[in-house]
Image (cartoon, helix red, strand yellow):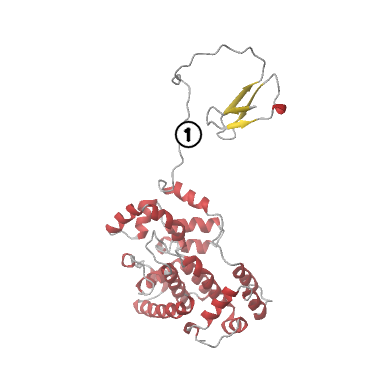
């Protein structure tokens, strides 16, 4: 028997041998969940009725008209955030060798040979590790000829940072049309923030050095998820930018939230450390982070990176340093100048080999 749902028009083919003859049955439509009733009792066929216009809904009868789903260009605020989170199922793709290498390095029983063997299973990763290991930044130009030698010379901590850096090149190296960032621009800025964060942490919170580098590298990852939605609203974005708004302010105005808020959602979804999530959420406003030292470090590094010609973004001049940052980290203007010079040199030395 073939029947059609009166509410949504979905056609159903029901096997006759499974229908209870002589009974009246009801079940929900698999399409719209409205009630479908089939009367299988024997009846005398009624006289055909003359064609007539559909009757208007009677008083007290509720007529539900389906609402068309909004496109992503029409959504904003909580609805848009929910849509984005639902579309991102897992962490950004990263070569399996990176996870395996970190696992091996995290085992105190593992030696340099085991780590080298893991990295060498991916020729592309291995080649980039050797390129960066031989960069002027590490002071080993032309001296490292094998992965095993690189692991011995660099050590576990530096090697972990290096492979994290290498693995992020493809993820952060794409062009972001919505944010007006050319290919490699986000990567250069993120690398600058990561390197500067590590420098600050090394001086002010040595135990946080690796965390500072990792968070600095992905602090703007929320932009990767938002770029297409910013691009869909290019006319609104252009209007706000022309009025002098920063991209952070533009995100708030055209989407209802910014990339730091989305980053917090993603960190929570992926069960990343709370300290990292808070630092990413408040890297533009660390004074709201309830004293999160990592947030202050990444914020200050982000400010310094914006001053570096090699990695500044188009709206760099619109971002200022949180008034509490220097006191919180016990830094002064001379420290900022020194970090800026060191960061500029480091990015230049590394990108010559990596990009």
> Along the horizontal axis of the image, is 30 left or right of 200?
right
> Along the horizontal axis of the image, is 150 left or right of 19?
left
In the image, 214 versus 57, the foreground residue is: 57
When the figure is inspected, residue 333 is found, relative to residue 264, above or below; the finding is below
Q: Position of residue 273 (x, y in %)?
A: 55, 62
Seen at 40% across and 78% down, the residue is 344
The image shows a total of numbered marks equal to: 1
Q: Is residue 326 visible?
A: no
In the image, 219 versus 57, the foreground residue is: 57
Q: Position of residue 91 (x, y in %)?
A: 55, 60
Q: Position of residue 351 (x, y in %)?
A: 45, 77
Q: Is residue 341 visible?
A: yes
When the figure is inspected, residue 24 is found, relative to residue 124, above or below; the finding is above
Q: Give the residue furthest to the left.
A: 243
Seen at 51% across and 74% down, the residue is 209
Q: Give the residue furthest to the right.
A: 17
Q: Give the residue furthest to the bottom.
A: 143
Q: Which residue is mark 1?
A: 66
Label 1 crowd bin: few (<14), some (14–19), many (20+), radius 10 Å: few
Q: Secondary structure at mark 1?
A: loop
In the image, 125 versus 252, the foreground residue is: 125
Seen at 50% across and 65% down, the residue is 171
Seen at 66% across and 80% down, the residue is 113
């Amino acid at each position: 028997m073939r029947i059609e749902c009166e509410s949504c028009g979905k056609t159903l083919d029901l096997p006759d041998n499974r229908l209870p003859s002589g009974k009246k049955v009801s079940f929900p439509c698999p399409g719209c969940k409205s009630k479908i009733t089939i009367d299988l009792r024997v009846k005398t066929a009624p006289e055909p009725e003359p064609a007539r216009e559909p009757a208007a809904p009677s008083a007290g009868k509720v007529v539900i008209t389906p609402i068309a789903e909004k496109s992503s260009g029409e959504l904003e605020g909580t609805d848009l955030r929910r849509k984005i989170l639902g579309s991102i199922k897992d962490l950004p793709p990263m070569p399996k060798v990176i996870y395996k290498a970190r696992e091996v390095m995290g085992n105190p029983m593992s030696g340099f040979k085991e780590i080298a063997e893991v990295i060498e299973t991916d020729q592309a990763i291995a080649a980039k590790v050797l390129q960066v290991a031989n960069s002027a930044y590490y002071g080993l130009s032309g001296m490292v000829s094998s992965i095993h030698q690189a692991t011995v010379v660099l050590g576990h901590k530096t090697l972990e940072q290096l492979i994290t850096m290498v693995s992020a090149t493809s993820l952060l190296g794409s062009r972001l049309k919505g944010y007006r960032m050319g290919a490699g621009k986000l990567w250069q800025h993120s690398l600058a923030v990561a390197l500067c964060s590590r420098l600050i942490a090394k001086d002010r919170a040595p135990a946080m050095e690796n965390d500072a580098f990792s968070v600095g590298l992905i602090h703007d990852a929320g932009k990767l998820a938002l770029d297409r939605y910013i691009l869909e609203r290019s006319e609104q974005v252009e209007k706000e930018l022309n009025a002098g708004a920063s991209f952070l302010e533009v995100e708030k105005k055209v989407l209802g939230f910014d990339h730091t808020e989305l980053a917090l959602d993603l960190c929570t979804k992926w069960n990343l450390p709370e300290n990292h999530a808070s630092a990413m959420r408040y890297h533009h406003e660390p004074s709201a982070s309830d004293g999160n030292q990592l947030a202050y470090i990444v914020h200050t590094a982000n400010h310094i990176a914006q001053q570096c010609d090699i990695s500044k973004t188009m709206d760099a001049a619109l971002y200022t340093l949180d008034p509490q940052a220097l006191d919180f980290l016990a830094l002064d203007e001379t420290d900022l100048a020194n970090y800026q010079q060191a960061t500029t040199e480091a990015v230049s030395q590394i990108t010559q080999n990596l990009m």
